[in-house]
């Protein structure tokens, strides 16, 4: 948390989860949106245009033009012919994390993305968990790490997949770390346990994030339990979270077709979208912030900001979709629960602390160079540009 002093010998996160990937760089905004239907409409508008008009609508950059030939995005359904002569339906949009706690949609077509990071998409599946560093909000102790099952588009953070291979194969952890923890704890933790502990214990260090480790089974169990709850809330997997005591937020007055303004009344615990009302909304949910600002304000702005005057990004929903209301109600719940005080880290000295010096003595650190590079995960041929097979 911001303002918490770092542990002098705590190992860096960059050593404990050594393989990291830069986030994909789209190069244009229109292939992503909070609404999947408008993405299909944007694709159809692009393909109805021809020649120079299609090129202009595409919004070319130095990395991508409508004449660029690229391989298919791993796991994607996009074509590989040059976009200038592409035809057919829109590749099925996929869910992505576009901003902290903001799930949106992306057209998964390599031709639309300046830097897609194929190594990231090769390991994205239902069992993968991505840890993403976020800028800390000043004077607000929110998580320094996000955890998501969705491909993250957040910039400029580094993305650290929990697994180096699909199907939860080969954890992205310092080689030997799990074995060393098993000796110290008296039982073998699994990779998700390590990530859960990391979400609980991570803090700023002198050169990046550090993760104090412990060999105390009681401390470890408490930290892992808190971290697994955080994982559940951030990933929104399984049973939907609910606020205790019947404080579930509801729509008390209908939301207008196109709300333009968002405001919060702390005394009433009410969120106003123009004349629409949602309550109860705990103050903690409204105040929940990252380095870019309040999460609820950022989420609302992404859906109601100024409409583009021209181009494909100007194609947006004509009215506020019902799905956005459901997403907003769930987001309020998630933020309120995440903001609840956790068990915290025991201020007493940890006689069982596992520091970087101990990990070096055990041969866990420094990590080998290969651990910082992506694993070879290809078990099939990937289609390359213009239908050829990619040579990797």
Image (tube, rainbow, N blue to C red):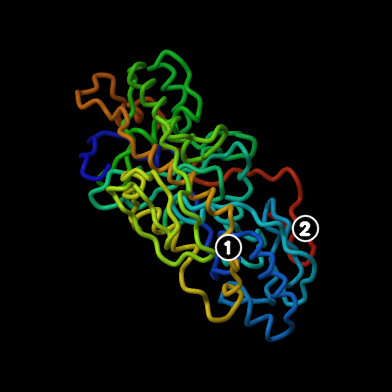
Q: Quadrant of the C terminus?
A: bottom right
Residue 389: mark in rendering:
2
Distance, label 2 to label 1, CA atoms, is 27 Å
Residue at 57% over, 81% down = 310
Name the residue nearer the viewer: 109 or 379: 109
| Residue drawn at the location 43% of the way across and 50% of the way down | 278
Front disc: 2 or 1: 1
Residue 349 image position (x, y, % from top left): 20, 23
What percent of the width, then of the height, locates residue 81? Answer: 76, 69
Secondary element at image label 2? loop
- Camera-nearest residue between 367 and 37: 37
Q: Which mark is residue 32?
A: 1
Q: Position of residue 225 (x, y in %)?
A: 41, 25
Q: Considering only vertical position in the picture, is 185 above or below 94?
A: above
Kindly identify the residue that appears in the image at 63 percent across and 79 percent down. 57
Q: Secondary structure at mark 1?
A: strand
């Amino acid at each position: 948390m911001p303002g918490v002093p770092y542990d002098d010998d705590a190992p860096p996160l960059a050593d404990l989860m050594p393989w990291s990937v830069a986030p994909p760089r789209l190069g244009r905004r229109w292939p992503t949106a909070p609404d999947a239907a408008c993405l299909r409409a944007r694709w159809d508008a692009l393909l109805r245009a021809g020649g120079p008009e299609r090129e202009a609508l595409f919004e070319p950059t130095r990395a991508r033009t409508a004449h660029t030939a690229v391989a298919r995005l791993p796991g994607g359904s996009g074509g590989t012919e040059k976009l200038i002569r592409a035809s057919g339906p829109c590749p099925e949009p996929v869910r992505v994390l576009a901003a902290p706690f903001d799930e949106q949609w992306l057209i998964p077509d390599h031709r639309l993305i300046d830097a897609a990071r194929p190594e990231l998409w090769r390991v994205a599946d239902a069992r993968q968990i991505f840890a993403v560093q976020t800028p800390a909000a000043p004077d607000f102790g929110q998580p320094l790490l996000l955890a998501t099952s969705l491909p993250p588009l957040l910039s400029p953070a580094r993305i650290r997949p929990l697994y180096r291979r699909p199907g939860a194969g080969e954890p992205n952890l310092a080689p030997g770390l799990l074995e060393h923890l098993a000796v110290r704890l008296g039982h073998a933790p699994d990779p998700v346990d390590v990530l859960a502990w990391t979400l609980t214990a991570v803090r700023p260090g002198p050169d990046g994030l550090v993760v104090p480790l412990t060999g105390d089974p009681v401390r470890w169990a408490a930290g892992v339990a808190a971290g697994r709850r955080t994982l559940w809330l951030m990933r929104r997997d399984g049973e939907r979270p609910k606020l205790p005591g019947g404080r579930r937020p509801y729509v008390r007055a209908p939301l207008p077709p196109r709300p333009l303004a968002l405001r919060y009344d702390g005394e009433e615990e009410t969120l106003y979208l123009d004349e629409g009302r949602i309550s109860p909304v705990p103050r903690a949910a409204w105040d929940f912030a990252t380095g870019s600002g309040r999460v609820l304000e950022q989420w609302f702005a992404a859906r109601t900001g100024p409409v583009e005057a021209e181009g494909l990004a100007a194609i947006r929903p004509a009215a506020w979709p019902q799905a956005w209301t459901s997403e907003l109600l769930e987001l309020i719940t998630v933020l309120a629960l995440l903001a609840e005080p956790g068990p915290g880290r025991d201020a007493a000295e940890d006689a069982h602390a596992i520091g970087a010096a101990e990990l070096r003595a055990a041969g866990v650190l420094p990590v080998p160079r290969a651990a910082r590079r992506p694993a070879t995960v290809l078990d099939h041929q990937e289609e390359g540009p213009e239908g050829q097979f990619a040579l990797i």
